[in-house]
Amino acid sequence: MDRVEEYRNTIERILEAHHRIPYGHGELESKLIIDPERNNFVLMVVGWDGKRRVHGCVVHVEIIKDEIWIHRDGIEQGITDELVASGVPKNKIVLAFHPPNVRQYTGYGIGGS
């Protein structure tokens, strides 16, 4: 199995586990959206919290070349630790929500390898 396929499986497994966690309030549910052809993985929350409509992105991860780019990470403990625990090297994880000039100080990849 090549590295990109390995990353796809790892990301899908992690997000599937988070997708299965029920919300403790409101009428909220998660939606897991996976586009394996374009290597995009999105975990959304949708529904109602009282009178307030909720519709937002919790996590957006994309595989670009052989790196995992985290565009949005709204998971309480963060997805990065789970990726590292699953064997993904830190230099292959890009915290894309940080500006490029800050990424070198994060301990993760800077992008563009």
Image: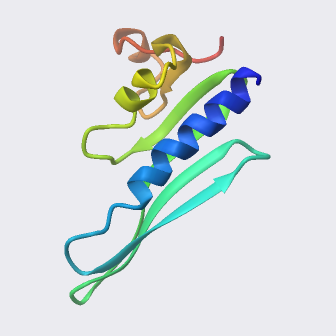
* Residue 22 spot, x, y in % from top left: 31, 68
- Whether 36 is drawn above or below 48: the answer is above
Residue at 37 percent of width and 11 percent of height? 107
Residue at 47 percent of width and 25 percent of height? 86
Residue at 24 percent of width and 90 percent of height? 51
**Which residue is situated farthest in the bottom direction here?**
51
- Choose between 112 and 45: the one closer to the eye: 45
Residue 64, can we see it?
no
- Whether 6 is drawn above or below 17: the answer is above
Residue 107, can we see it?
yes
Residue at 76 percent of width and 22 percent of height? 2
Q: Quadrant of residue 28?
A: bottom left
**Which residue is situated farthest in the front direction here?**
1
Instruction: Give the left or right position of residue 23, taking residue 2 as reference.
Output: left
Quadrant containing the C terminus is top right
* Residue 102 spot, x, y in % from top left: 38, 17
Instruction: Give the left or right position of residue 102, taking residue 42 as reference.
Output: left
Q: How many marks?
A: 0
* Residue 7 spot, x, y in % from top left: 62, 30
Q: Quadrant of residue 106?
A: top left
Quadrant containing the N terminus is top right
* Residue 16 spot, x, y in % from top left: 49, 53
